[in-house]
Amino acid sequence: MTNSHAARDIDTSRPHSARMYDFYLGGKDHFDVDTKAAETVAAAYPGIFTCARENRAFMHRATRVLAREHGIRQWLDIGTGIPTEPNLHQVAQSVVPEARVVYADNDPLVLKYAERLMRSTRQGRTTYIEADVNDPDTLLNAPELAEVLDLTRPVALSLNALMHFVTDAQDPYGIVSRLLAVLPSGSALALSHCTPDFDPATWQKVTDIYTGAGTPVQFRSKDAVARFFDGLELLEPGITVGHRWRPDSEPVASDAEVSLWTGVGIKP
């Protein structure tokens, strides 16, 4: 894989959300500054490790459901994060080997490890784009996207634990609408979003930690998360806590531990 962005320096002077998420998942691709910030979050909200695992598990289940039951063969995954196996394309291609996946993230450390995201089946295709969800037009116009995805056929837009990093001032609903607008009927939105609904005081502490570290966040209520699905046909069980969206086994964590609204909607 060749990439013109590879020379851009990785900023280790402040924590980055993707690297903190890697810490929550037990990964090794983070720095001391990320560890310290993540440990501060964990001290305020010990459930963060459960939340991260359940977010990942939701992505796996939603991907399989869309592939098996709704004929999806293409995915646009924004806010990919540092590769953690199985990655989305591995899950999708385990069901449909011809699946095509475009990953996008704005952290250069993700770019460094993007080769892990390129290991496609022979029948399928994957690529990685360095892009920011706050600039959807640049992402949608990237030549790499057009090389892998056919936007005349259904695409699943995967936004996992991403939109709470887009504050209301940045027009999160407008961004999601813009991304969905270019996708044809039969496309899907799979979205997960942290929420303060079950423990507002704790999540205010988490908000303060992220914002104080230079990463503004806005955790949203169930009603506010549901707005992302306006105009879509929600799959059962609708908007629900992550571990309760079509679980593979009986959930054991509490809703407050997970504190993650999830949903999958189909574009009519």
Image: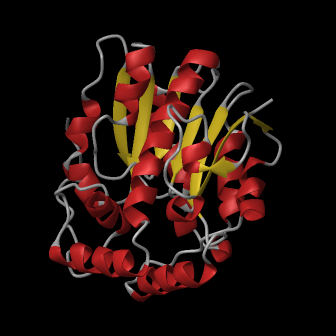
Residue 142 seen in render: no
Is 164 located above or below residue 217 in the figure?
Answer: above
Q: Quadrant of the C terminus?
A: top right
Task: Tell whether 19 sits left or right of 160.
Answer: left
Q: Is residue 123 above or below residue 140?
A: above
Query: Is 40 in front, or is 144?
Result: 40
Residue 169: x percent and y percent? 66, 77
Q: State the residue at coordinates (26%, 62%).
A: 23
Frontmost residue, 242 versus 101: 242
Residue 38 is situated, as x and y percent measured from the top left of the image, at: 31, 74
Color encoding of the figure: secondary structure
Percent position of residue 93, x then y: 39, 19
Q: Is residue 51 left or right of residue 10?
A: right
Above or below, 201 relative to 140 = below
Is 199 on the left or on the right of 90, as rendered?
right
Quadrant for residue 181, please give it: top right
In the image, residue 212 above or below residue 19: below
Answer whether residue 176 is visible to the viewer in this image: yes
Quadrant location, the N terminus: top left
Q: How many marks?
A: 0
Q: Residue at x 50, y 56 (%)?
A: 161
The reply, left or right, for residue 143 in relation to residue 40 is: right
